[in-house]
Image: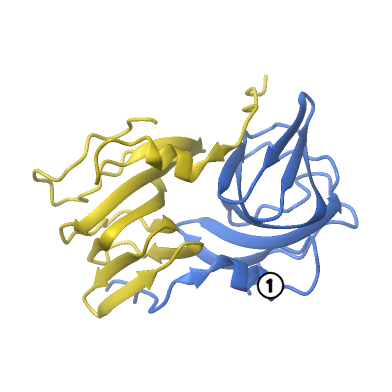
Chain colours: A yellow, B blue
């Protein structure tokens, strides 16, 4: 028995536009044990790291700034950036940016930092 | 020791434009044991499946048609489609399409079909 393939593709910006709150990643698809999530962000997140996994960002709209200890990297629409595991980073945007993130199921947005900015995990849009 | 993070994001269309041959996926980044590959396609590929893994497609330019036994799915720029493991599919495009594919390292473009359309694996651009 094979799974039934979806009948339609997923428009990523249409999905991110449905999210009510900024900094609240929402799952749009899965690939094996990985999840594709979209998120709207503005301002600055908290510094954190994911010791157990790399984390990929694809920008859909706006400009993503990823602060690293070595300095910022700017990611534009149509660009991809992979934060290596264990590397401290802080996502940020002036104005609003829409992103897709790819990471294993179960990863929290704040890594091991926890705190009030930790979003509910595994919510779909 | 943490890996050194890259200093720049990857522009996916800039990368796919560098590829000389159609149907020749080129790796642009890795995330854990997964690879991000870009590819230019036109016409029709062969029917195949990947029994061991799902396979994700993000369209960068043009229109991707994914033929499934149930009928075609069309994927436009900014759209994502995940072919579930074991599902027979055939990628196609009228005119040229530029895609990003995401799959585990070591997966061949022809699945277990082999043959003359099997591309050299693990080549970076």
Q: How many numbered discs sit on the rendered protein?
A: 1
Horizontal side of A110 relative to B4 (left or right) equals left
Give coordinates of residue B41: x percent, y percent.
78, 58
Question: Could you say whether the residue bearing mark 1 is in a helix, strand or loop?
Answer: helix
Q: Position of residue A88 (x, y in %)?
A: 22, 66
Q: Is residue B124 above or below residue A121?
A: below
- Mark 1 packing: few (<14 Cα in 10 Å), some, or many (20+)? some
At horizontal 42% and vertical 56% (from top left) the residue drawn is A61
Identity of the residue drawn at 75% across and 42% down? B65
In the image, residue A20 above or below residue A96: above
Q: Quadrant of the N terminus of chain B?
A: bottom left
Q: Residue furthest top?
A: A1
Identity of the residue drawn at 37% across and 35% down: A18
In this view, the residue in front, A39 or A111, is A39
User: In this image, A4 relative to A112: left or right?
Assistant: right
Q: Residue furthest front?
A: A95
On the rendered structure, is B44 left or right of A35? Answer: right
Which quadrant of the structure image shows residue A95? bottom left
Q: Which residue is mark 1?
A: B17
In the image, is A111 to the left or to the right of A100? left
Q: Residue placed farthest to the left in the image?
A: A115
Q: x, y percentage for residue B48? A: 79, 40
Which of the 4 quarters of the picture holds residue B40? bottom right
- For the C terminus of chain B, the image quarter is bottom right
Q: Can residue A103 be seen in this snapshot?
A: yes
Q: Chain of mark 1?
A: B
Note whether residue A105 is visible: no
**Where is residue A40 shown, x and y percent of the image?**
31, 48
Quadrant in which residue B121 is drawn? bottom right
């Amino acid at each position: 028995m094979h799974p039934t393939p979806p009948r339609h593709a997923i428009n990523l910006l249409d999905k991110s536009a449905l999210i009510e709150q900024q900094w609240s990643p929402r799952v749009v698809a899965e690939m094996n044990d990985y999840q594709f999530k979209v998120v709207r962000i503005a301002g600055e997140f908290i510094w954190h790291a994911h010791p157990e996994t790399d984390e990929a960002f694809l920008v859909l709209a706006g400009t993503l700034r990823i602060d690293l200890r070595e300095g910022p990297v700017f990611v534009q629409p149509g660009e991809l950036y992979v934060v290596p595991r264990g590397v401290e980073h802080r996502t940020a945007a002036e104005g609003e940016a829409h992103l897709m993130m790819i990471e294993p199921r179960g990863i929290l947005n704040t890594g091991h930092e926890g705190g009030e900015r930790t979003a509910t995990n595994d919510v779909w849009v």
